[in-house]
């Protein structure tokens, strides 16, 4: 079950992510603290469930609820709030909410209800082949390995009181090239990213035209932005394959832990949506 969290409190998002991650079958695919960002990312991720507060960093949960339903979102929307129940429950239900929970007393009911919504697992669920942990062409981490290593890095960052910066880089024009040229350029891209990282950083190829880079120790947003500029300059240099230079377009998105999101998939979702111009 894919779940999207809309909550402006980092501490509450941490709590929800920790509890939901402990429930089999639950997957956090995105996080947002404000109405406009949440609307764009929910359209981008198409989650099964949106879990939202009413008080947001900008806009309101009630406004977001109305926008989602008017825009055709058909997934389940659950409101989890500290607002007075009698005053807000009816307004939310009338606007299209499927459930309403009190933060102080309703968390366990929320988790129980989500578990009841999970589809039954087929008997062959454990028979699927394990996904590769390395990309066969570049040798970088695969998307599956990226999630695991990013989760470990987030735990270490929380322990050490530092931040993470997650970058997604999208190569434009790669699909228009002959396969052998595209492969050669992807290998060169991987080499450049390896050169730009420290031993503790993470580099992954998450799709044919997408790479992820995780800076595992960041002091503040300015340092993360400065590194984004260095990455852009490094990758702007021409690539060489097939006897000629190639200038690829590079679209870069960035997300910060824990300010922007606290779950690995949500960090990658935000950075990827930015790289694709969805925000």
Image (spheres, grey):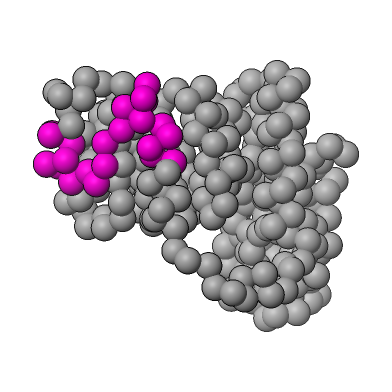
Image x and y of residue 126, in percent: 67, 69
Locate residue 249 relative to residue 135 in the image: left or right.
left
Seen from the viewer's position, the closer of residues 72 and 177 is 72
Is 118 on the left-hand or right-hand side of 262?
Answer: left
Find residue 53 and report its image quarter: top left
Observer-nearest residue: 207 or 134?
134
Residue at position x 17%, y 51% in the image = 70
Q: Tell me where residue 137 appears, x and y as whole percent.
A: 80, 70
Residue 73: image location, x then y, percent: 26, 55
Asked whether residue 38 appears in the rendered view, the answer is no
Which is nearer the eye, 6 or 222?
6
Measured along the vertical axis of the image, is residue 11 above or below residue 25?
A: above
Front in this rendered view, residue 114 or 157: 114
Q: Is the residue 224 above or below the residue 129 in the image?
A: above
Q: Quadrant of residue 91?
A: top left
Q: Tell me how many marks there are.
A: 0
Residue at image position (31%, 21%) is 82
Q: Is residue 101 visible?
A: yes
Residue drawn at 74 percent across, 54 percent down: 145
Residue range highlighted in magenta: 90-111
The quadrant the C terminus occupies is top left
Report x, y in % for residue 77.
29, 46
Q: Residue at x 53, y 67 (%)?
A: 121
Say whether residue 39 is magenta: no
Magenta region includes residue 110: yes
Q: Which residue is farthest right?
A: 199
Splitting the image into 4 quarters, where does residue 241 fall? bottom right
- In-image side of 158 versus 277 (left or right): right
């Amino acid at each position: 079950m894919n779940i999207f969290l809309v909550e402006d409190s980092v501490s509450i998002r941490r709590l929800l992510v920790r509890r939901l991650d402990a429930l089999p079958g639950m997957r956090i695919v995105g996080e947002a603290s404000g109405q406009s960002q949440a609307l764009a990312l929910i359209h981008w991720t198409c989650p099964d469930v949106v879990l939202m507060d009413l008080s947001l960093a900008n806009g309101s949960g009630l406004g977001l609820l109305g926008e989602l339903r008017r825009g055709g979102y058909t997934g389940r929307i659950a409101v989890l709030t500290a607002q007075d129940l009698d005053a807000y429950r009816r307004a939310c239900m009338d606007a299209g909410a499927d459930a309403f929970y009190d933060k102080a007393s309703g968390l366990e009911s929320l988790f129980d209800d989500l578990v009841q919504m999970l589809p039954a697992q087929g008997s062959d669920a454990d028979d699927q082949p394990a996904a590769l942990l390395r990309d066969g062409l570049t040798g970088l981490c695969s998307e599956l390995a990226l999630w695991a290593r990013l989760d470990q890095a987030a735990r270490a960052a929380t322990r050490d009181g530092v931040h993470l910066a997650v970058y997604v880089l999208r190569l434009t024009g790669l699909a228009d090239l002959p396969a052998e040229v595209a492969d050669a350029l992807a290998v060169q891209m991987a080499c450049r990213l390896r050169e730009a990282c420290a031993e503790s950083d993470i580099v992954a190829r998450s799709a044919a035209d997408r790479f992820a880079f995780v800076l595992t120790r960041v002091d503040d947003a300015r340092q993360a932005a400065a590194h984004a500029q260095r990455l852009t300059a490094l990758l702007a240099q021409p690539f060489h394959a097939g006897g000629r230079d190639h200038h690829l377009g590079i679209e870069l998105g960035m997300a910060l832990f824990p300010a922007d999101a606290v779950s690995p998939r949500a960090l990658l979702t935000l950075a990827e949506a930015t790289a694709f111009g969805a925000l």
